[in-house]
Structure formats: C-alpha cells, structure tokens
Image: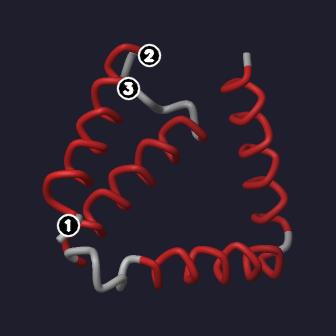
Amino acid sequence: EKDDKRVKMGQALLATMSHDPNLVKPMQQAYNEHLKELNNPDFKFEKAAVVSLAADGLFLLELLRLSPYSASQKNIIINELVKMIDNEVLK
C-alpha cells in the first residue's frame, strides 16, 4: 500500500513534468547534488556509481510499473546492493 502510494505520486510527478519541463530543474539540481556525493574520497567512484544507477533503475521500473521482480526478488537485489556498498564501494 505504501509502495503503491509512492508509485502513484511518482507517476503524477512524471505526468506533470512532461507537461511543464521547467518542473524538472529542481529535480535535476537535487540529483546533481546526489551525484556529487559519489565523489566522496571514502568511496570508489565507479562502484558507487554502479550501485546508484542500479538503485535508480529499480526505482524507475517501480515508478513506471514495469518491474518484473517480485517483492522477494527486490529484497534480494537490495540486499546485494547493500553488500556491494559494504564490500566494494567503501575504501
């Protein structure tokens, strides 16, 4: 139910942004700030970028209701991403 609410909010946001592209600018700024965090000297940039892109992809698939993954599979994927952060992203 909570995820369904997020998906609906995301879909509404996408619809609004497609109507008025200027609404994308604050999101672009926020995402650019997020990307700056990947340049943290405690992170291996390329590994952090891969984890970030994977998380973005999962989120986008959910938002568009295109995800082929069950809840159990999503949990497995997320747990693997967390392991990657612990074992490969952190220097």
Q: Of helix, strand and loop, which one carries label 3?
A: helix
Instruction: Give yes or no for contact between labels 2 and 3 (Cβ–Cβ under 8 Å).
Output: yes
Choose between 91 and 66: the one closer to the eye: 91
Relative side of 66 to 52, left or right: right
Instruction: Answer above or below: position of 36 versus 18.
Output: below
Q: Amino acid at mark 3?
A: Lys
Q: Secondary structure at mark 2?
A: helix
From the image, tell me which residue sits under label 2: 71
Q: Which residue is mark 3?
A: 74
Protein image colouring: secondary structure
Check contact, mark 2 vs mark 1: CB within 8 A.
no
Residue tagged 1: 47
Label placed on residue 83: none
Q: Amino acid at mark 2?
A: Ala
| Residue 8: percent from left, percent from top | 77, 34
Kind of residue at disc 1: Lys
